[in-house]
């Protein structure tokens, strides 16, 4: 099971320049707030797609049962 | 991508998305959501007094798989308005709070900052049963 710190590191290495705050009470359900200039000009749907794309097929809904996500450009 | 002439489920999903102005793919039904994220999304739609079609992806595992490949969105729920993916529970919740959801749905934007009710009122439309179209 990934820890919140591992999920944070994955997001920050997956999106250059991103800063992520990740919390989890159980290492299964995660809540993340991601700030990245790369989101600028993208719809919310596309911003979330960028974060989801970091995680492999089956990982979301699998070992990461839920990832509540907020994305911001700054 | 290769052509897949025989994909009745994908066709049924595409048809449901294009023929319903507001359609929510969720776990469970608006009356009995089977997941907190689906419940919250229903509650936001209900709070904006929007009629919406609902599809229970738990009815058949192939629905979720095919939907995610069609929408390029990995999680459930998924809200479509006029054929476009609006988002999942987080985006719908965020847009509800900002009043944007009401704007997208064409509803009066008065509900904007009200807190979401804990439970959704039953939706007015009967659930679409995509699984019944499976061979």
Image: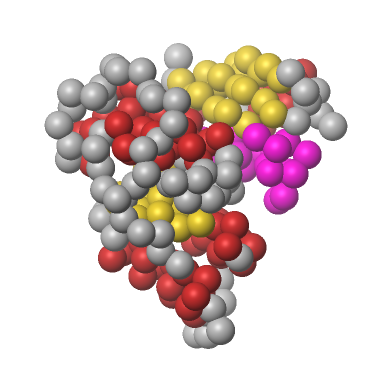
Q: Residue at x 53, y 36 (%)?
A: B37
Nearer to the camera, A38 or B43 = B43
Residue A62 place in picture, x, y as percent: 75, 44
Viewed as shown, does residue A69 lie left or right of A61?
Answer: left
In which quarter of the view is residue B43 placed? top left
Q: In the displayed structure, would residue A57 be above or below residue B112?
A: below
Residue A50 appears in the figure = no
- Residue B133 colored magenta? no
How many numbered badges does the structure rendering display? 0
Residue B33 place in picture, x, y as percent: 52, 44
Q: Give the range drawn in magenta.
A: A44-66
Nearer to the camera, B71 or A27 = A27
Nearer to the camera, B88 or B73 = B88
Viewed as shown, does residue B11 lie left or right of A67?
Answer: left
Q: Quadrant of the N terminus of chain A?
A: top right
Residue B39 appears in the figure = yes
In which quarter of the view is residue B45 placed? top left
Viewed as shown, does residue B124 lie left or right of B32?
Answer: left
Residue B20 place in picture, x, y as percent: 29, 60
The furthest residue to the right: A1
Q: Residue at x 50, y 24 (%)?
A: A70
Viewed as shown, does residue B56 lie left or right of A59?
Answer: left
């Amino acid at each position: 099971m990934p820890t919140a710190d591992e999920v944070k590191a994955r997001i920050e290495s997956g999106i250059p320049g991103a800063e992520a705050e990740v919390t989890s009470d159980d290492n299964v359900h995660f809540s993340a707030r991601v700030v990245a200039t790369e989101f600028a000009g993208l719809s919310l749907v596309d911003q979330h797609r960028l974060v989801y794309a970091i995680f492999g097929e089956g990982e979301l809904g699998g070992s990461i049962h839920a990832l509540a996500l907020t994305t911001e450009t700054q | 991508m290769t052509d897949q002439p025989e994909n009745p489920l994908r066709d049924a999903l595409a048809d449901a998305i294009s023929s319903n102005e507001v359609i929510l793919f969720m776990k469970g039904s608006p009356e009995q959501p089977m997941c907190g994220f689906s419940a919250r999304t229903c509650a936001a739609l209900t709070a904006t007094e929007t009629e919406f079609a609902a599809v229970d992806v738990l009815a058949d595992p192939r629905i979720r798989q095919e939907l995610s490949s069609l929408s390029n969105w990995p999680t459930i729920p998924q809200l479509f308005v006029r054929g476009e993916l609006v988002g999942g529970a987080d985006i719908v919740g965020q847009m509800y709070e900002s009043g944007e959801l009401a704007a997208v749905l064409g509803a009066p934007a008065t509900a904007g900052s009200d807190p979401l009710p804990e439970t959704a009122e039953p939706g007015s439309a009967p659930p679409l049963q995509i699984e019944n179209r499976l061979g």
